[in-house]
Image (spheres, rainbow, N blue to C red):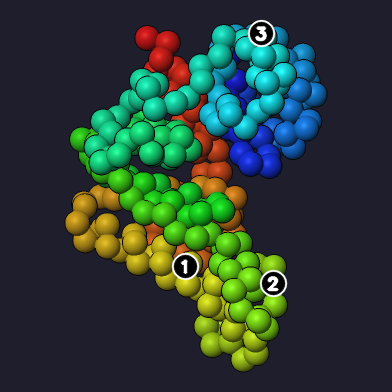
Amino acid sequence: MNLTIDVGNTLIKLGVFDSGKLKLKKTCLKKDFLHTLAEISEAFPAIQKCIISSVANLSEHQSIKLQHQFDVLILNHQTKIPFTNKYETPNTLGIDRIALVSAAAEQYAGKNVLVIDAGTCITYDFLNSKSEYLGGAISPGISLRYKALHTFTEKLPLLEASNPNLYIGNNTATSIHSGVVNGVLYEIDGYISEYKKNYDNLTVILTGGDGHFLRDSIKNDIFANSNFLLEGLNHILEYNKH
């Protein structure tokens, strides 16, 4: 059994995999990491291997405890990965993006795949049918757009994300919702359409924290998978066992 750990700025996501299948997914605050780890270890004593991304965000005590308990692979830019990285500056490619592309390489081998991760930032990552990673794009996520409108203007309020029913806002709040949410949707559909013009049989994966909020409003056909990053981490761990 494998344990995958994705360490974010605030939250830590953990996944337990057995024979490639996700058996448990947990999310905790960083301060609760060791308690959550102990619960998982007790429930799944067969876990031996572990992979972790963004280990720098763990405390030294947490990191030592983890490495005493499991055989840990720390994902970095030297880790062996199941695709050819043609990014011009490979050492600057985000670890989370490496994990997402690894999931695409393993699960959609021989296909053109666009992975869209809708989180704090929206990232677009493209893997071609030859398993070559060509790059993608990074833009502000939904929450960043709402915060930017409030922070960099004098009078616009800070709003919580809401799906606009109309594209023409008839007051300040509905205008902001239309601008932010429809702007994101038009952007995503625009990128998908542009990729489709150049690459046949494109598979599109939508993941990330805002994926559930966006998925039903995207016009193009997509596969929504909230566990895609954890699955990618597990694929990398398996790939490095050989």
Q: Which of the pair 53/131 is nearer the observer?
A: 53
Image coordinates for residue 163, horizontal then vertical, percent: 61, 71
The residue tagged 1 is 185
The residue tagged 2 is 159
Image coordinates for residue 170, horizontal then vertical, percent: 62, 91
State the image quarter where residue 84 is shown: top left
Q: What residue do we see at 69% from left, 33% from top?
A: 26
How many residues crowd mark 2 within 10 Å: few (<14), some (14–19), many (20+)? some
Q: Are marks 2 and 1 in contact (CB under 8 Å)?
A: no
How many residues crowd mark 3 within 10 Å: few (<14), some (14–19), many (20+)? few
Q: Which label belongs to residue 68?
A: 3
* Quarter of the figure with the C terminus: top left
Under circle 2, the secondary element is loop
Alpha carbon separation for disc pair 3 and 2: 44 Å
How many residues crowd mark 1 within 10 Å: few (<14), some (14–19), many (20+)? some
Q: Nearer the viewer, mark 2 or mark 1?
A: 2
Q: Amino acid at mark 2?
A: Leu
> In the rendered image of this protein, does residue 98 appear above or below residue 145?
above
